[in-house]
Image: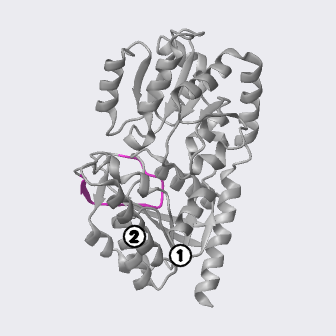
Amino acid sequence: MRILMVSDVYFPRVNGVSTSIQAFRQALQAAGHSVTLIAPDYGQAVEDEAGIIRIASRGVIIDPEDRMMRIRHIHRLTAELQAEHYDIIHIHTPFVAHYAGLKLARKLKLPVVATYHTFFEEYLYNYIPWLPKSWLRYVARRFSRTQCADLDALVVPSTAMKQVLENYGITTPMAVLPTGLDLRMFDSGDGAAFRQHHSLAADRPLLLFVGRVAFEKNIGFLLEVVEQLLPSLPDVLLLITGEGPAEKSLHAQVQRSGLEQNVRFMGYLRRDGDLQACYKAADVFVFASRTETQGLVLLEAMACGTPVVSTAVLGTKDVIGAGIGGLVAPENAASFAAQVKRLMIGKTLHAQKAKEARQYAATWSHTAQAEKLLAFYQDTLNAKRG
């Protein structure tokens, strides 16, 4: 099958959407299918794999990490793309990519599907705080209904997200297809060497958050958890790995709370060994985002044998809801800290959860998920022809 993907984000921009696209592309290509991706040019030199078309783009005022593709540059590719005889178009983001993908689908007479990666209802107010939440929630729901109605089919990463969209009144055919893991990526990485390189004692209690440092990730709550742990684990350290618009606010919270010796901001780590080493260096991976449509980083941590303590909200419920490979905690700093402490102090429990984590992560193979996506494409093609 020949697949054309369109996205407003891709590497070197590091986030869950980029990771999802890469995982599915690699698995589909390994199975013999052709996958072309249209994505922004970030104005920096990158060595792209084959099949990436970079589009001239401009900055985004409210989020300097992102870029907005120039839609007319995509439209100029129509004749070139038509000559490739694609079977289907897959849109991954709801901005320029959505409207460009729809226009290409009409011109090329192709079915179009999209993945609903972002839960906008719990996202917008972090970036437009001067407008009422109720109004933003209404706008987000209407926006989602309008965009989904334009599609032939919709991929959602979790059952909870599917239920949310059904409650919106969306009737577009949907399939629950979480992003799979390429387990080979998590074979590398030396946790002990990572600790030594960053001057971290081998026995220092180490917590880890990996992800975009954004308000919707609820990282401020994790800082409150660290405060709760100090009486029993005074040398506990939380590593925050990633970058994003909430960094200034979080640095200020660290200073107000006197946590300078217990929190370290690591920035982005390369995914070819450094990130895996960081996962393996940590004793516990902590997560409390309210907006995840899946929560892929939970599975990445588990693949490295690091137990998880997380809330089970929306997409993370599918991953950690059963308590396999970690512990579920409510969004209450004292209760969450108690679960972390159980794993830190209980060596037998920690070993059990670490073993569970590796075994559980192995069931989320990217190959199996790509096969399901391919079958969904075929169903969509058949329905369109019918």
In x, y percent, where is residue 44?
30, 46
Q: Is residue 276 visible?
A: no
Q: Which secondary structure, mark 1? A: strand
Q: Which residue is mark 2?
A: 142
Q: Is residue 251 left or right of residue 377?
A: left
* Other residues around mark 2 within 10 Å, as few (<14) / some (14–19) / many (≥20): some
In x, y percent, where is residue 72?
26, 72
In x, y percent, where is residue 280?
61, 25
- Quadrant into which the C terminus falls: bottom right
Question: In the picture shown, does residue 367 fall above or below 287?
Answer: below
Q: Is residue 123 visible?
A: yes
What's drawn in magenta, residue-wise? 46-60
Q: Amino acid at mark 1?
A: Ile
Does the residue at mark 1 contact the one at mark 2 (Cβ under 8 Å)? no
Q: Which residue is mark 1?
A: 88
Which quadrant of the figure has residue 330? top right
Task: Check residue 306 for magenta coloring.
Answer: no
In x, y percent, where is residue 362?
73, 43
Q: How many marks?
A: 2
At 60% from the left edge and 57% from the top edge, which residue is drawn?
A: 160
